[in-house]
Image: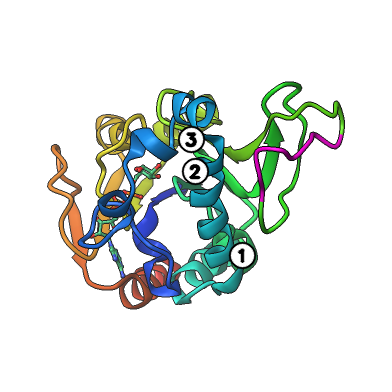
């Protein structure tokens, strides 16, 4: 039995990392077009680096929570295939022990050169005058996917979702494509689907089962039930 999970900012909320669309969330304090697009980076790289420096410092001060650990345990103990697809750019799934995972929106943990695409572990703080450690270009950016850029691993993700017996959305509002289209694909391909969320995403078609609550409570319970079945 193959299991695919798709996580969003809600799974890291109880680790203290902000979500995007809840009240007082990131997009209430910053405009996407000012900090999360290639045009924003070209126009004002200092503001873009400030935004990601704050989030990177928050991420490095945060710890994985019970929901991250539960998904890592599912990967360790489930006998069939497991793939964790995350929209999050934090490294909490990795630090909880998940390895069969893909970060479709990139990783805040890394920096990347916009000139030669070389990637390396990002320092805590990045600035427009930083130079690429490989080609020396003054074009260092966070290794994350901005609006208007292609997500990563999409072909691998779609293949896994098509073959999934179980597909679960965890802590995502389902507002950003292509991630938001994966539930419909899973349904169309016959998977048993779950939405595990604090508030219903309202996605259509909706998941067959909706488990509401905080991820640190709902995800460990869901994993324990799966491992018993
Ligand atoms: N436990 C479970 N779910 C939670 C919790 C919690 N403690 N707190 C919040 N949530 C849920 C909210 O109810 C909401 O459904 O997490 C979801 C957060 O939604 P968003 O803030 O929209 O985050 P996400 O769905 O990950 O955004 C997708 O949008 O801005 C882009 O690239 C960004 O990857 C991000 C994408």
Q: Quadrant of residue 165?
A: top left
* Tag nearer the camera, 1 or 2: 2
Identified at 16% across, 42% down, the residue is 203
Magenta-colored stretch includes residue 131: yes
Identified at 53% across, 66% down, the residue is 58
Towards the viewer: 139 or 176: 139
Write down the region rendered in magenta.
Answer: 126-133
Towards the viewer: 215 or 224: 215
Quadrant assignment for ligand 1: bottom left
| CA separation in Å, label 1 and label 2 | 40 Å
Mark 1 falls on what kind of element? helix
Left or right of residue 71, residue 127 in this image? right
Number of the label disc, if any, that sits on residue 47:
2
Q: Which residue is mark 3?
A: 160
Q: Magenta-highlighted stretch: main secondary structure?
A: loop
Q: Which residue is mark 1?
A: 76
Number of the label disc, if any, that sits on residue 195:
none
Specify which label sits upstream in the sequence, 3 or 2.
2
Towards the viewer: 40 or 177: 40
Mark 3 falls on what kind of element? helix
Q: Residues within 10 Å of mark 2 (few under 14, many from 20)?
A: some
Identified at 84% across, 29% down, the residue is 136
Q: Is residue 132 visible?
A: yes
């Amino acid at each position: 039995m193959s299991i695919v999970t798709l996580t969003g900012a809600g799974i890291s909320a109880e680790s203290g990392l902000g979500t995007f669309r809840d009240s007082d969330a990131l997009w209430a304090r910053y405009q996407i077009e000012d900090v999360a697009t290639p045009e924003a980076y070209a126009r004002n790289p200092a503001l873009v680096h400030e935004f990601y420096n704050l989030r990177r410092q928050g991420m490095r001060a945060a710890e994985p929570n019970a929901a991250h650990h539960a998904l890592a345990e599912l990967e360790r103990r489930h006998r069939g295939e497991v793939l964790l697809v995350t929209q999050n750019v934090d490294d909490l799934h990795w630090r909880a022990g998940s390895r069969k995972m893909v970060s479709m929106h990139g990783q805040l943990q890394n920096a990347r050169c916009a000139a030669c695409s070389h990637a390396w572990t990002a320092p805590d703080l990045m600035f427009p005058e930083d130079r690429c450690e490989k080609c020396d270009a003054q074009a260092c950016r966070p290794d994350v996917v901005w609006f208007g850029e292609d997500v990563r691993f999409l072909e691998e993700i779609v293949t896994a979702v098509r073959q999934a017996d179980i597909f679960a959305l965890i802590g995502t509002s389902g507002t950003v494509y292509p991630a938001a289209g994966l539930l419909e694909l899973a349904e169309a391909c016959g998977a048993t689907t779950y939405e595990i969320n604090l508030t219903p995403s309202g996605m259509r078609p909706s998941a067959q089962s909706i488990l509401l609550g905080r991820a640190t409570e709902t995800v460990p319970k869901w994993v324990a039930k799966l491992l018993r079945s």
